Image (cartoon, helix red, strand yellow):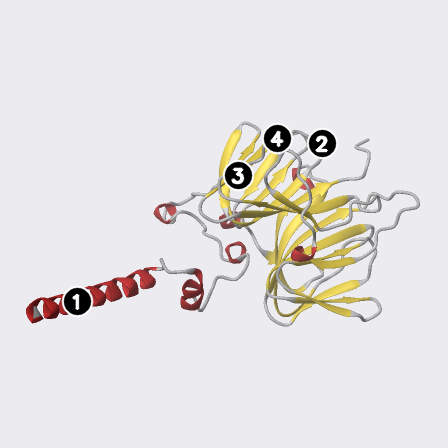
Amino acid sequence: MHYFSAFFAKSFLLLSTIFGVLSIAVTEEGFCSAPFIIESNSNPQPLYSKVTNPTLSPSHLQDLPGFTRSVYKSDHALITPESHVFSPLPDWSNTLGAYLVTPAMGSHFVMYIAKMQESSKSGLPPKHVERFIFVVQGFVTLTNVSGNCKTLTVDSFAYLPPNTEHQFESYESATLVVFERRYAYLEDYIPEPIVGSTNQQPLLDTPGEVFQLRKLLPTSLPYDFNIHIMDFQPGEFLNVKEVHYNQHGLLLLEGQGIYRLGDSWYPVEAGDAIWMAPFVLQWYAALGKIPTRYLLYKDVNRNPL
């Protein structure tokens, strides 16, 4: 009897030790509960890190000369990170910019990435040109003509109406996505400057669709374009295969998926930029293991004539 008691005691101790080792091994492999995962990840990836540190190409193609996913056609363009060309931005100090969408391809707006370095300052857009900026890395200080300052961090944005005196300043490195267009004036309507952040904007109804939608600018008549933040869970897709008169400029902030433009199907991921001309067929499906988020320019509130 004592023999069996000792045997079971030793067996229990052995099993406890084995399961203890297994528990530790599983924890180290990352299959533990959420609090332990959070604690073990002391240096999480910052928001939108793939925009500023993109995967330039799949590992098995990185040494293939001339490889790129970038495409330019008459009604759309896919500009992937390995094709971005940076040069000093006109009228900005200590800042490099890569123009991704310009009127040279048929758009009525420009979209560019501005990489501000230490002690850099923005310039002003041309007369009658409005500006929208969205912070994807670092932080910047916005100062208006009255000397009032606001700090914009990642996921924050600012809209400046045409002919508005302002300056963005960065004391460390910061990355901005910038949209500019010549303002389409409407009698008796004047847009106001706006500063905000994505999480302050309410989720809007999307009848017939499953994605989540936020609009960063008011939908009222003074504003001739809007910026949408669209979120898709993996496996979700647009139900409507869109064909419309509006133009789009898009930057994929997170995730990956398939974008259909016309008769072409493109694998896309965070860091990719897309231009869509009026009436090009467009459709998106989110793939992979993490949600998709993209930033989308759309002209609104003006008669296409």
Distance between the alpha carbons at the discs numbered 2 and 4 = 15 Å
Name which residue type carries label 2.
Tyr
Name which residue type carries label 4.
Val
Q: Which residue is mark 3?
A: 236
Residue shown at 24%/65% (left/top)? 21
Q: Which residue is mark 1?
A: 14
Name which residue type carries label 3.
Glu
Q: Indicate which disc residue 240 carries.
A: 4
Circles 1, 2 touching at the beta carbon (< 8 Å): no
* Left or right position of 130 against 50: right
Q: Indicate which disc residue 216 carries.
A: none
Query: Which badge, 1 or 3, comes first in the chain's sequence?
Result: 1
Residue shown at 79%/50% (left/top)? 129
Distance between the alpha carbons at the discs numbered 1 and 4 = 60 Å
Name which residue type carries label 1.
Leu
Neighbour tally class for label 3: few under 14, some 14-19, many 20 plus, Cα within 10 Å: some
Q: Nearer the viewer, mark 1 or mark 2?
A: 1
Q: Which residue is mark 2?
A: 245
Neighbour tally class for label 2: few under 14, some 14-19, many 20 plus, Cα within 10 Å: few
Circles 2, 4 touching at the beta carbon (< 8 Å): no
Residue shown at 52%/48% (left/top)? 291
Residue 3, position in %: x, y?
A: 6, 69
Name the secondary structure under disc 2.
Answer: loop
